[in-house]
Amino acid sequence: MFDGPEPIYVQIAAWVRTQILAGDLADGDQVMSTTQLSTTFRLNPATAAKAYAGLVDEGLLVKRRGIGMFVADGARDALLAEHRRTFYTDVLDPALDRAALLGIPVDELVDHIRGHARTTPGGDPR
Amino acid sequence: MTPQPFGARLEGVTLRYRRDDAPALDNLDLTIRPGVITGLLGRNGAGKSTLAALLAGWRRPIAGRVLVGPAGALEDPFENTWTATGTQLVRESGDHWEGTAARDTLAFHAEVRPSWDADLAEHLVGLFGLDVGTHPERLSRGQRSALGIVVGLASRAPLTILDESYLGLDAAHRYAFYDVLLADYAEHPRTIVLSSHLIGEVERLFEDVVILDRGRVLLAESADDVRGRGVTLTGPAADVARVAGDRPVLARQQLGSTTQVTLDGALSADEHAAARAAGLDVGGVSVQDLFVHLTGGAGAAPATEEER
């Protein structure tokens, strides 16, 4: 856990974002304290605090004095909106560039997207 | 109540053990931030133990000055009872009371350390399965290390220096030690200086990192900066060279037409994007890897043994 190349606080923040996005942490849920985070994952408490401070600045977590740290109201919606904004530039465009490099025709891609959506729960069947 | 953590400052510090020897510490400038866990890294003979002994006031420099104490009230620690009361140095050798039961070593520290926590000491004795009825010199190396850890943590000293003092512990007990250290530090913040050769195991515990090399400070910065400092680039040699620019190359590997370089210096966002556009693989460099590259790789062994 948290042994990727990025700074550890960046990885912790990404992990919390993923949990919120996946619904494992709902709006209003209390998150682990920095001490719990530090002892659970064996890392410096200041590193854990730095990750949380960034998430508070982004409006995803709120601190309630003396009680702890909680997921902010609307955090998941905000994250979803952010991911939708960057989906084309960060996810789809690189895949399409690669498809062009491999010479895959556009029609084939469109067919694939339709077929994939039909077999994916929650996908659009049209 | 937890006392104010101690910070430390070294200014132009030189220490030589014998007149004709190379200095163990050579015109060293360094600040240890109060309330922070600092990793003190260096190869054998780099000067780690000498630095630890200076901070603890066990030695004095032949030039420069050493200052230790709470923010705004730093003092020369040499023969200084007040700073000595707040400074706990645990060395690998243990410095335990020999010829008498280990519990007498603990009783001594309980007497001289105003912040000694008897409950924590008892908890740690149980955790490490330490037989306090045995004389320290008859304990196994692991048990002697454990005794040092009990002293180091239960003292709750405003400045705690653990100089390779836990290397005798087996892996399970080392991880138990890291866990207790973090939990107790979170509740009772204090200044902790931890030196170790097991960098991969402990680097995540550090907030600051100091790397010594041949008596000089090679690097002193936050652990995040150390992790963000190096970068590896992998791909066709020409593209790698273009993105690398004039950054110092710490290591280079050639695999057919693919080159991998380890660079000292982070990439800007634009350079990162350019690297990805060129199809290069961009990776990070761990504190351990950076340390090995900066201190001369696996080459010649250092000439001097770490001195006490």
Image (cartoon, coloured by chain):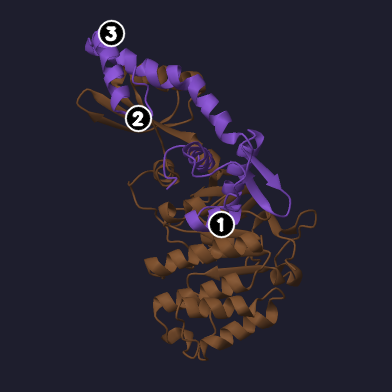
Chain colours: A purple, B brown
Q: Residues within 10 Å of mark 2 (few under 14, many from 20)?
A: many
Rendered location of residue A118, percent (x, y): 30, 23
Work out whether A27 lies above or below B52: above
- Eye-nearest disc, 2 or 1: 1
Q: In the rendered structure, which amino acid carries the disc numbered 1?
A: Gln
Task: Please name the residue that numbered disc 2 is placed on.
Answer: B261
Distance, label 3 to label 2, CA atoms, is 38 Å
Distance, label 1 to label 3, CA atoms, is 50 Å
Q: In the rendered structure, which amino acid carries the disc numbered 3?
A: Val
Work out whether B279 lies above or below B120: above
Rendered location of residue B39, percent (x, y): 53, 53
Q: Residue furthest left?
A: B256
Of callouts 1 and 3, the N-terminal one? 1
Task: Please name the residue that numbered disc 1 is placed on.
Answer: A36
Residue placed most toward the observer, B302 or A15: A15
Task: Please name the residue that numbered disc 3 is placed on.
Answer: A106
Circle count: 3
Give the residue at x 54% y 25%: A81
Is B197 on the left or on the right of A30, as rendered?
left
Give the residue at x 60% y 53%: A33
Is B300 on the left or on the right of B5, as rendered?
left
Callout 1 secondary element: helix
Give the residue at x 33% y 48%: B300
